[in-house]
C-alpha cells in the first residue's frame, strides 16, 4: 500500500491532483461566459445554461459505464484515456457555430471528463493505506477547487482577450501537456484484479449500493449540496454583470477566487473525519454554506464576496466528507460506488442550475433565497437520517 511521506505517495497524489485540476478546468471553462453567451446567441439565461448543464449531465450519465470499464481494464488506463481525450474534444469544439452544436460538444467533453472522475478515488482506495486515503482525498478535492477557479478565471479573461475560441484552444493545449505529466508520474496499480466478463456482477453492485441507505443518502447529500454551490455562483455572475453593478465578465469571474476557501476546508475535512463524526461535519458544512447564501443577500459587493467565501467553505467541507464516506463504506465495487456518488453530484448540479436560475429570472435574489432555503432544509433532513442509519444499519456488499 502507498503510505504517507513515501515517494510513491508524492508522485501519485500530485498526479491525481493534476488530473483533477485538468478535469475541472475543462468542465467549468464556460461558466463565467454564460451572461455573454446569452447575448452572443440571443437566448435566455435558462437556455444558455445548457453550456454548463450539458457537460455535467453527460459526465453524470457516463460515470458508471467508465467505472464498469475500469473494473475490467484497470483504473489507471481509464484515467489516462479520459485525460488524453480532453485536447481532442477541445479542438472539435472550435468547429461549433451554434448554441446547439456547442452544447453537444460540451456534452462530449463531459463524457470524456467522466472517465477520470469516475475512478480516481477508487484508485486511491485500493492503492493507498487508510490514513493516506483520507489525506489524499482531501488533496484531490482541493485540486477540484483549484481547477474550478483556474478554468473559470481563464475562461473569463481569455474570452475578453481572444474570444471563446481562444479560451478553448488555450485550454486544449494545457490539457495535452497535463495529460502527459500524469501519464509519466502515476504509479502502476499493485492491488487491482481485473474482473473481465463480470457485467452482471457490476450491475448487482449498482443495485445493491442503491438499496443501502447508508450509501445512497450521502449520494443525495452530495447532489443537493452541489446543486446549491455551483449554481449560486452562476446566479451571482448574472447579478454582477447586470445593473447597477454592470461589471465586465473578466472582473465578474474574479468571484471564483472565493473557491480558495473551499480548497482549505476540503483539506481540513480529512483531519475532521479522523477526530469527529463525518455526519456532524456535513451538518456543519451545510450550516456554513446556508449562512453564506443569506449574507450574500446584502446589497454590497463585499457582502456578496463574504457570502461566497462561506458558501465555498461549507460546500466543499460537506462534499469531501460525503465523498470519502461512500468510498470507505462500500466494501466491494468501490469504483461503482464512487461513480454513483458523482452521478448524484453532477445531476444535482445540472438540474439545480435550471431551478435557481429560474428563481433568479422571476424573483431576483429573494427568489433564490427562498428556493435555496428549501434545498438546505432537505440537506439537514438527509444528514439527520444518515446519522440514524449509521447507528442502526451495517453496510453489506455483493461478493465478486
Image (spheres, rainbow, N blue to C red):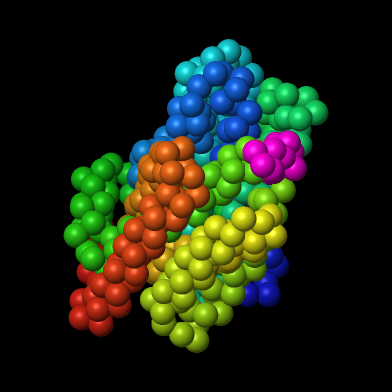
Query: How many numbered circles are shown?
Result: 0
Residue 179 position, x and y percent, is 66, 41
Residue placed most toward the observer, 316 or 246: 246
Question: Which segment did they paint magenta?
Answer: 243-253
Task: Work out whether 353 lies above or below 270.
Answer: above
Give the quadrant of residue 243: top right
Residue 60 x, y percent position in the rendering: 40, 42
Residue 67 in sight here = no
Left or right, 53 with respect to 141, comes to: left
Magenta includes 252? yes
Q: Is residue 135 above or below residue 236?
A: below
Q: Nearer the viewer, residue 193 or 363?
A: 363
Q: Is residue 75 above or below residue 310?
A: above
Q: Nearer the viewer, residue 14 or 353?
A: 353
Q: Residue at x 36, y 38 (%)?
A: 61
Tell me the quadrant of the picture where the C terminus can be found: bottom left
Residue 131 in the image: state x and y as whole percent: 53, 77
Amino acid at each position: 500500500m502507498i503510505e504517507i511521506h513515501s515517494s510513491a505517495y508524492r508522485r501519485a497524489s500530485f498526479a491525481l491532483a493534476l488530473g483533477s485540476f485538468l478535469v475541472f478546468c475543462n468542465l467549468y471553462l464556460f461558466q463565467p461566459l454564460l451572461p455573454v453567451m446569452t447575448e452572443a446567441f440571443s437566448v435566455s439565461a435558462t437556455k444558455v445554461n445548457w453550456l454548463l448543464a450539458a457537460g455535467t449531465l453527460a459526465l453524470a450519465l457516463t460515470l458508471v459505464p467508465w467505472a464498469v470499464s475500469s473494473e475490467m481494464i484497470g483504473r489507471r488506463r481509464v484515467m489516462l484515456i479520459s485525460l488524453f481525450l480532453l485536447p481532442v474534444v477541445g479542438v472539435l469544439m472550435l468547429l461549433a457555430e451554434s448554441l446547439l452544436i456547442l452544447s453537444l460538444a460540451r456534452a462530449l467533453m463531459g463524457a470524456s471528463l467522466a472517465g477520470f472522475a469516475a475512478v480516481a478515488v477508487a484508485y486511491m482506495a485500493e492503492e493507498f493505506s487508510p490514513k493516506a486515503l483520507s489525506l489524499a482525498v482531501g488533496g484531490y478535492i482541493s485540486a477540484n477547487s483549484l481547477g474550478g477557479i483556474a478554468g473559470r478565471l481563464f475562461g473569463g479573461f481569455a474570452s475578453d482577450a481572444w474570444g471563446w475560441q481562444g479560451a478553448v484552444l488555450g485550454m486544449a493545449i494545457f490539457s495535452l501537456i497535463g495529460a502527459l505529466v500524469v501519464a509519466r508520474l502515476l504509479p502502476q496499480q499493485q492491488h487491482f484484479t481485473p474482473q473481465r466478463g463480470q457485467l452482471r456482477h457490476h450491475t448487482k453492485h449498482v443495485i445493491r449500493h442503491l438499496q443501502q441507505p447508508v450509501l445512497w443518502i450521502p449520494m443525495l447529500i452530495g447532489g443537493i449540496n452541489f446543486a446549491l454551490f455551483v449554481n449560486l455562483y452562476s446566479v451571482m455572475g448574472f447579478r454582477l454583470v447586470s445593473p447597477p453593478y454592470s461589471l465586465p465578465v473578466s472582473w465578474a469571474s474574479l468571484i471564483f477566487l472565493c473557491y480558495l476557501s473551499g480548497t482549505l476546508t476540503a483539506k481540513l475535512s480529512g483531519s475532521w473525519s479522523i477526530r469527529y463524526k463525518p455526519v456532524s461535519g456535513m451538518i456543519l458544512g451545510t450550516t456554513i454554506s446556508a449562512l453564506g447564501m443569506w449574507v450574500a443577500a446584502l446589497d454590497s459587493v463585499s457582502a456578496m464576496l463574504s457570502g461566497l467565501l462561506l458558501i465555498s467553505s461549507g460546500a466543499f467541507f460537506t462534499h469531501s466528507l460525503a465523498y470519502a464516506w461512500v468510498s470507505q463504506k462500500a466494501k466491494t465495487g468501490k469504483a461503482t460506488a464512487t461513480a454513483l456518488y458523482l452521478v448524484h453530484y453532477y445531476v444535482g448540479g445540472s438540474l439545480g442550475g435550471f431551478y435557481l436560475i429560474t428563481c433568479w429570472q422571476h424573483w431576483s435574489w429573494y427568489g433564490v433565497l427562498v428556493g435555496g432555503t428549501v434545498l438546505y432544509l432537505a440537506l439537514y433532513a438527509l444528514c439527520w437520517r444518515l446519522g440514524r442509519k449509521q447507528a442502526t444499519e451495517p453496510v453489506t456488499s455483493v461478493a465478486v
